[in-house]
Image: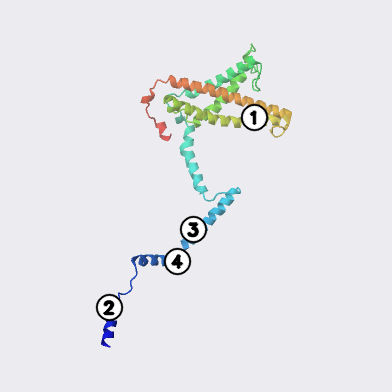
Amino acid sequence: MTLSAKTIRIANVASPPPTTSRRSHRYYPRRRASRVVAAKPTEDDDDAVEKQSNLRRLADDDDKGGIDFTVDVEAEFKRGLEYGRTEIRGRFTPDAVSTVDRGLPIADAMVATSAQVFVAACALAAGSRPSWLIPSTLGGLVPNWRGLPYLVPAIGHGTKLATVWLVGALAGKAYQRRAFDGSFKEAMKRTTQAGCFAVGLLIVVTQFEVAHKFDVAGLGEPLLGSSREGDLILNGALSELLVDIASEAAALLAWRAIRWNTSPTDPATLLEEKEEEWR
């Protein structure tokens, strides 16, 4: 009995208590925590799912031609108004023309008008007159001598194109000092920007003129293929529009290149002006 008790006692002392490994001690609690989170979704998860479904629904509506409500329309509208007041409005004020050359708009207008006089002379020499080249003596004010009566419509048409160019030049900031007294690249860039705006405005004016011609002739809507007379009007308006754009672009680009080349100011020492603050 004594021996067996000692044996049992020794066996109890020799056998160590069961212990868990470090790996299992770290792994299983995390596993249980992940199961709890997966089993009980939070309110944030529900909100995220609902937001995704709403965005998906708005994308489907946008594909169907709906309004994208994800953009704050009111804030964007106010931002556009602020940009118009601070940036666009200042381009059409007297301060938009540099004090270094206040006569540059007048020079531009004279170049634009002279270009159409040259076009009229070429058209008369070629025997193909545009629709606007109709001789006029202004009620006897202009002598009917040789081709002098054709000078009146040429100046009138050139005045229209000069007006369109001046608006485009103001919109494209072509009268700031950098546009004619800076680098050559900047001068051509400003001139091209102004020309693009002027071309867009000229297209709108041409559309109104064509619509008026159709209305006077009783041809209805200005649609290509509706009638032979209407097609002649549309084709003539398109060809004249292309000639106007090409002639004005060549004349004004050449003039601005000459103006930049004859500038008395060294571009390397170009001084900053107040007009560049809102550039």
Q: Secondary structure at mark 1?
A: helix
Give the camera-side residue of 221 and 193: 193
User: For the residues carrying marks 4 and 3, which lies nearer the camera in this image?
Assistant: 4
Residues packed near mark 4 inside 10 Å, few (<14), some (14 to 19) or many (20 plus): few
Residue linked to disc 2: 13
Location of residue 119 (image quadrant): top right
What residue appears at the point 43 percent right and 28 percent down from the top-left corner?
178
Count the marks: 4
Location of residue 113 (image quadrant): top right
C-alpha gap between disc 4 and disc 3:
20 Å
C-alpha gap between disc 3 and disc 1:
56 Å
Q: Position of residue 171 (x, y in %)?
A: 50, 32
Q: Amino acid at mark 2?
A: Val
Q: Secondary structure at mark 3?
A: helix
Residue linked to disc 4: 35
Q: Residue furthest bottom?
A: 1
Q: Position of residue 70 (x, y in %)?
A: 52, 50
Above or below: residue 159 compared with residue 28? above
What residue appears at the point 57 percent right and 31 percent down from the top-left corner?
201
Of pointers 4 and 2, the one earlier in the residue sequence: 2
Residues packed near mark 2 inside 10 Å, few (<14), some (14 to 19) or many (20 plus): few
Q: Amino acid at mark 4?
A: Arg
- Circles 3, 1 touching at the beta carbon (< 8 Å): no
Q: Amino acid at mark 1?
A: Glu
Of pointers 2 and 3, the one earlier in the residue sequence: 2
Above or below: residue 85 compared with residue 96? below
C-alpha gap between disc 2 and disc 3:
58 Å
- Circles 4, 3 touching at the beta carbon (< 8 Å): no
Residue linked to disc 3: 48
User: For the residues carrying marks 4 and 2, which lies nearer the camera in this image?
Assistant: 2
User: For the residues carrying marks 2 and 3, which lies nearer the camera in this image?
Assistant: 2
- Circles 2, 3 touching at the beta carbon (< 8 Å): no
